[in-house]
């Protein structure tokens, strides 16, 4: 039986194509907003998106944790509280990989301006606050393209926490970091967890070239700054509607 | 994060594993850090782990599952409690992966990370609790199959080793090595067909299923050869008879666990495996 090997072509050498961030190997651009809950980032990205949409730009909006492929697993894990820091992180990475491979990367290669509400930095800040090693997290997400600009919305902890607690009937278990056993009081646990996340974000301002945005500035004024900064950093002309 | 926050744990040492393991104390393990490849998994106290983790690796059709059934019976006969693990058996995502595989819509990185999630869920919810209770864990495949499958699909080996650096280092890792043609015979005999994933059809290697299977399994085998050198596998010729392979496995495991006699004859229930 084994003689069949003779005519079989040698298996192709696996080129250890490094799954690392491509160096702008695409015509698109990636714009990211980051910040703790209640920092105002989603509002600002929404306004930015509306501005670009109205102008007819070639854009796509993507959110953290929104892929249908792993949604059921995420829901099961959260509802039954099965997630540990490691599996929580892995599952979100799988979710992100799905979005990255099937949405973000094809769109960047297709010349879109991609707007992302939260990106890998959310995982770096949050999962490290849960106890995952930063080096492990950095490696886990090393396949993600590096953003052209990352807006970091920073609001004082008390301001952000008040915004969230006031707007929500009940904080969810993982959202409040209850799995860490910091405090039995959900609001208290949430506050301490967010504080850790905030500290982790602050450290990335330098290491990851965040553009710091003051979340306490009035909405329309902050939006004006954001549009200004985007125009300076990204060549918007290439995403403008093409004239025939 | 800033470098200051990064623990200065070494990455997986190339070839470093057998030498380190021999230093461990008789009943358990001298030092927590050597129980992991790199950074320890968060929330694990290795001092509590009194059981043994024994891994059987090999491609499809290498006889792993047969050997694990027999080893389980032998160990239980010797008075050891056994826990098993295998791919896609986690409560968290086992069924989700089945669904992803059935759809063929999944991309390589997502699949690799879903398998990783499945692995870590079993590690934390099945393996570690068993090891804390002093059980023998028999793993039907481990991180090595996951690394090999992802690597042949072009995902970087360093990247993959980085993910699994927080995994527990097995006490013994056996590799049942068989040629792809032999694996083909066995797999075909078992299910009268060759599956999509076992022949690596997502990789578009050949439209001929036999060719596709052989080429894919050859690529996997090559990754195993590399992994074997890097991690010090105990290599066994998987083409020998079930009884012969089983005898070698028992001998090595007996010496690890301090079992005096390696005599074993399968019960009636398992006699059909003893060919």
Image: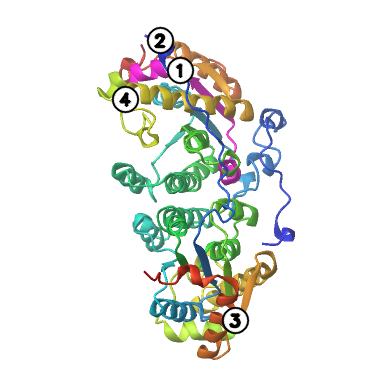
Marks 1 and 4 close (CB-CB < 8 Å): no
Could you tell me which secondary element the residue under label 3 belongs to? helix
Q: Alpha-carbon distance for marks 3 and 1?
A: 59 Å
Q: Residue A157: which numbered mark, if any?
A: 3
Q: Which residue is mark 1?
A: B178
Q: Which residue is mark 2?
A: A2
Q: State the SS at label 4.
A: helix
**Residue at 73% across / 58% down in the picture?**
B3
The structure residue drawn at horizontal position 50% and vertical position 39%, both measured from the top left corner, is B154
Q: Position of residue A154 (x, y in %)?
A: 60, 79
How far separated are the C-alphas under marks 2 and 1? Answer: 11 Å
- Identify the subunit bearing mark 3: A
- Chain letter of disc 2? A
- Mark 4 touches mark 2? (CB < 8 Å): no
Who comes first in sequence, dot 2 or dot 3? 2
User: Residue B159's image quarter?
Assistant: top right
The Cα–Cα distance between marks 4 and 3, rounded to whole angstroms, is 59 Å
């Amino acid at each position: 039986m084994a003689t069949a090997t003779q005519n079989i072509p040698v298996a192709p050498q696996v080129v250890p194509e490094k799954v690392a961030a491509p160096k702008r190997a695409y015509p698109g651009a990636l714009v990211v907003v980051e910040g703790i809950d209640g920092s105002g980032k989603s509002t600002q990205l929404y306004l930015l998106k509306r501005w670009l949409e109205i102008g007819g730009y070639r854009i796509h909006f993507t959110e953290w944790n929104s892929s249908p492929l792993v949604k059921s697993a995420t829901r099961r894990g959260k509802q039954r509280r099965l997630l540990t820091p490691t599996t929580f992180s892995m599952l979100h990475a799988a979710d992100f990989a799905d979005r990255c491979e099937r949405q973000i990367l094809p769109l960047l290669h297709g010349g879109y301006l991609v707007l992302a509400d939260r990106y890998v930095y959310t995982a770096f800040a949050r999962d490290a606050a849960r106890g995952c090693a930063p080096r492990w997290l950095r490696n886990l997400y090393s396949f993600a393209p590096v953003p052209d600009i990352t807006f970091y919305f920073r609001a004082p902890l008390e301001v952000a926490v008040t915004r969230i607690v006031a707007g929500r009937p009940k904080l969810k278990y993982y959202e409040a970091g209850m799995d860490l056993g910091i405090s039995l009081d959900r609001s208290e646990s949430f506050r301490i967890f967010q504080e850790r996340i905030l500290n982790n974000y602050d450290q990335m301002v330098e290491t990851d070239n965040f553009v710091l945005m003051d979340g306490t500035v009035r909405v329309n004024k902050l939006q004006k700054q954001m549009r200004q900064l985007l125009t300076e950093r990204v060549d918007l002309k290439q995403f403008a509607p093409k004239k025939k | 994060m800033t470098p200051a926050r990064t623990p200065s744990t070494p990455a997986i040492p190339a070839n470093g594993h057998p030498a380190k393991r021999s230093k461990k104390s008789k009943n358990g393990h001298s030092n927590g850090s050597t129980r992991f490849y790199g950074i320890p998994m968060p929330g694990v106290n290795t001092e509590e782990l009194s059981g043994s983790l024994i891994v059987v690796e090999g491609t499809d059709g290498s006889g792993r599952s047969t050997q694990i059934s027999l080893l389980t019976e032998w160990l239980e006969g010797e008075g050891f409690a056994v826990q098993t693990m295998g791919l896609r058996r986690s409560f968290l995502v086992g069924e989700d992966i089945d669904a992803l595989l059935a759809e063929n819509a999944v991309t390589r990185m997502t699949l690799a990370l879903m398998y990783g999630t499945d692995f870590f869920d079993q590690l934390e919810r099945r393996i570690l609790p068993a090891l804390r209770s002093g059980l023998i864990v028999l793993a039907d495949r481990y991180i090595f199959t996951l690394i090999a499958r992802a690597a042949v699909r072009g995902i970087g080996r360093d990247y993959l080793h980085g993910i699994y650096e927080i995994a527990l280092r097995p006490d013994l890792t056996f590799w049942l090595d068989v040629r792809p043609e032999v694996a083909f015979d066995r797999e075909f005999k078992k299910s009268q067909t060759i599956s999509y994933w076992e022949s690596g059809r997502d990789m578009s290697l050949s439209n001929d299923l036999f060719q596709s299977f052989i080429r894919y399994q050859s690529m996997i085998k090559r990754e195993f050869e590399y992994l074997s050198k890097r991690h010090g596998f105990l290599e066994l010729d998987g083409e020998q008879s079930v009884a012969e392979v089983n005898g070698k496995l028992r001998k090595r495991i007996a010496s690890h666990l301090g079992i005096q006699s390696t005599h074993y004859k399968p019960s009636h229930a398992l006699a059909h495996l003893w060919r």
